[in-house]
Image (cartoon, rainbow, N blue to C red):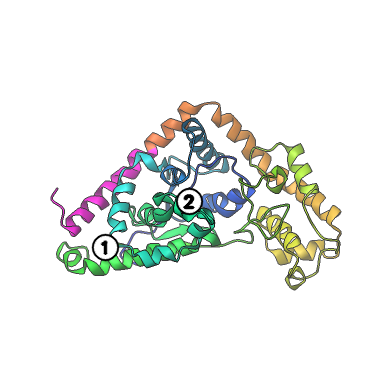
Amino acid sequence: MSQFKQRVFSGVQPTGNLHLGNYLGAITRFVELQNQYECLYCVVDLHAITVPQKPDELRSNIREVTAAFLAAGIDPSQHIIFNQSQVPEHAELAWVFNCVSRLGWLNRMTQFKEKAGKDRENASIGLYTYPNLMAADILIYKATHVPVGEDQKQHIELARDIAQKFNKDYAETIGMSGFGEAFFPLPEPLIQGPATRVMSLRDGSKKMSKSDPSDYSRISLTDTAEVIAQKIKKAKTDAEPLPSSIDGLVGRTEADNLVGVFAALSETTKEKVLEEFNGANFSTFKSALVDLTVDKISPIGAEMRKLQQDPQHIDAILRDGAERARLIARDVMKSVKEIVGFIQ
């Protein structure tokens, strides 16, 4: 992969009501990575419409995700923040990948099975081919690294398979066109940190989600300090005190989740958290977790609310980011057309 420029791409769906899981699982890492790589951070609105959306709500949600990127500390002057639908090359490359990807590969995607549920015949084709579009999102920029949660790792593996097959299928024209042995890199997933998968505050076996009917299952980024405190104090736990080692968290999903959240917010490890709170009861631990969460999340929520009051400012940042993203995407798509054999 040394022939490719080190570049990060990642996207967040504009589904509204961003929560602590989105922040710890994705956005904090986006902020860290901008110090090491050239980064493109995308609001993936084309993915959002794989399930029905209300147009006004979708526009509002796109701006909310953008506001979260900015409030968390991503610098739009140094890196690219944009929404996917403003760069048509994403969809254009996705069609090429629909013709490279195999039906058997998509049939193995567990996320489609989970999202479509039992009524798969009524799921949209977009929901089914979503991983091919995700591969296009990454590879239209020849991104080498993708920060993702554990649940998206399978999609990165598919993107690698698609890139590899494209490189092999068109090896002759890739070589003749002067692109070396491979046109697309094989992107690497970046899965890191103690809380890559934040679970529900009401059920430690389920991922924190905006679709959970209970508002007490999640901490939203725009929650007030009082609401954050209330939700953490009501979070499900067990009767045992906190253990002294990680082994003691086995089978204690809710305890493990809260320790992971504390570790991620304090930028330390679960081991260090347990050293500090070994033997403590949950009322003591939750009180410390409330203080920490309010300290980290409240300023972001306040800044998000402020930014969302000026939608024109957010839209201008997205337009500027899309123009800069297209400079890269156009060149890549032009080369893809040449390799495939299209007349331009």
Q: Residue at x 41, y 44 (%)?
A: 46
Disc 2 marks which residue?
34
Whether residue 205 sits left or right of residue 80 in the image: it is: right
Q: Magenta stretch mostly in which secondary structure?
A: helix
Magenta includes 296? Answer: no
Quarter of the image where one finds residue 262:
bottom right
Of 254 and 148, the residue lying toward us: 254
Q: Position of residue 162 (x, y in %)?
A: 34, 64
Q: Position of residue 292 (x, y in %)?
A: 73, 48
Could one spot residue 187 in this view of the protein?
A: no
Which one is closest to the eye, mark 2 or mark 1? 1
Q: Read off the magenta span.
A: 321-344
Q: Residues within 10 Å of mark 2 (few under 14, many from 20)?
A: some
Could one spot residue 213 in this view of the protein?
A: yes
Q: Residue at x 25, y 70 (%)?
A: 168
Whether residue 198 sits left or right of residue 232 in the image: it is: left
Query: What amino acid does circle 2 point to?
Result: Gln
> Split into 4 quadrants, where in the image is the N terminus?
bottom left
Q: Residue at x 64, y 52 (%)?
A: 208
Q: Position of residue 34 (x, y in %)?
A: 48, 51
Query: What amino acid does circle 1 point to?
Result: Phe
Quarter of the image where one finds residue 132:
bottom left
Disc 1 marks which residue?
183
Q: Residues within 10 Å of mark 1 (few under 14, many from 20)?
A: many
